[in-house]
Image: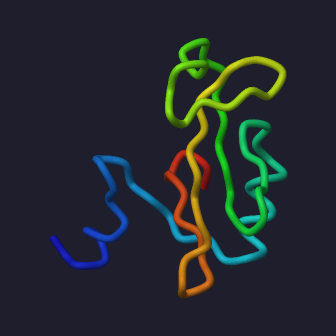
């Protein structure tokens, strides 16, 4: 497996690097994504969010996953958003 593929494959999920414009387009297109500063956050409604360390209340409990801005100026998001 190439180094690039290893970098893009996280926990069995293929990740895609997005530049600034692509990231903004993806966040606008998906209602479960939002911006928190420079990070992209995905949030899925889940009642277990009340006791989960990644739990967040947004009109109901859910679990969030943060995708931070990388040092190369890109964000790595799961391929399902691309």
Q: Is residue 11 left or right of residue 51?
A: left
Residue 21 at x, y percent in the picture? 78, 74
- Residue at 67% across, 31% down: 56
Which residue is at the front of the view, 58 or 21?
58
Give the quarter of the figure containing the N terminus: bottom left
Residue 82 at x, y percent in the picture? 60, 55
Above or below, comparing residue 9 to residue 4 in the picture: above
- Residue at 50% across, 34% down: 53
Quadrant of the image occupied by residue 18 = bottom right
Q: Residue furthest left?
A: 1
Residue 38 at x, y percent in the picture? 73, 69
- Residue at 54% across, 36% down: 54
Number of marks in picture: 0
Q: Is residue 22 left or right of residue 63?
A: right
- Residue at 29% across, 47% down: 12
Q: Residue furthest bottom?
A: 72
Residue 37 at x, y percent in the picture? 78, 64
Above or below, comparing residue 32 to residue 20 in the picture: above
Quadrant of the image occupied by residue 6 = bottom left
Q: How is the image coloured?
A: rainbow
Which residue is at the front of the view, 29 or 67?
67
Quadrant of the image occupied by residue 32 = top right
């Amino acid at each position: 497996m190439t180094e690039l593929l290893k970098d893009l494959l996280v926990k069995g999920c293929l990740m895609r690097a997005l530049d600034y414009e692509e990231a903004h387009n993806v966040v606008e297109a998906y209602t479960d994504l939002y911006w928190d500063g420079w990070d992209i956050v995905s949030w899925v409604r889940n009642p277990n969010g009340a006791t989960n360390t990644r739990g967040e209340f947004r009109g109901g409990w859910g679990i969030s996953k943060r995708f931070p801005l990388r040092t190369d100026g890109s964000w790595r998001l799961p391929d399902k958003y691309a």
